[in-house]
Amino acid sequence: MAQEQLHQPERTDFGRNWVSSSRFLFHVQLFTFTAFVLGGCYGLYTLRYKGKPQVEVPESTQYTPKYK
């Protein structure tokens, strides 16, 4: 007796094939996580602190104070 293999179209469906769907969802999660990390890094890079402010320090509060 010869065994016949019947092609079942529902076996190739995304929702029914656990291996293909889990691999696809893993790659989607990996891409989404990478996109969020790179977007956050880019946002921090563009909004970074540009320079030091010029703060006037009174002479009486310095490490070696100067009194009048």
Image (spheres, rainbow, N blue to C red):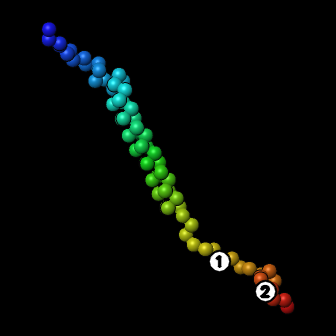
* Residue shown at the point (63%, 74%) measured from the top left: 53
Above or below: residue 59 compared with residue 36:
below
Q: Are marks 2 and 1 in contact (CB under 8 Å)?
A: no
Quadrant where the C terminus is found in the figure: bottom right
Above or below: residue 21 compared with residue 32:
above
* Residue shown at the point (47%, 51%) measured from the top left: 37
Q: As shown in the figure, which amino acid type bears the numbered disc 2? A: Thr
Left or right of 60, for residue 45: left
Above or below: residue 29 compared with residue 53:
above
Residue position marked by numbered label 2 in the rendering:
64
> Which residue occupies the extreme top position in the image?
1
Q: Position of residue 51 (x, y in %)?
A: 57, 72
Task: Answer with mark 2 or mark 1, whichever residue precedes in sequence.
Answer: 1
How busy is the neighbourhood of tag 1: few (under 14 within 10 Å), some, or many (20 plus)?
A: few
Q: Position of residue 34 (x, y in %)?
A: 43, 48
Disc 1 secondary structure class: loop
Task: Give the Cα distance between marks 2 and 1.
Answer: 20 Å
How busy is the neighbourhood of tag 2: few (under 14 within 10 Å), some, or many (20 plus)?
A: few
Q: As shown in the figure, which amino acid type bears the numbered disc 1? A: Gln
Residue position marked by numbered label 1 in the rendering:
54
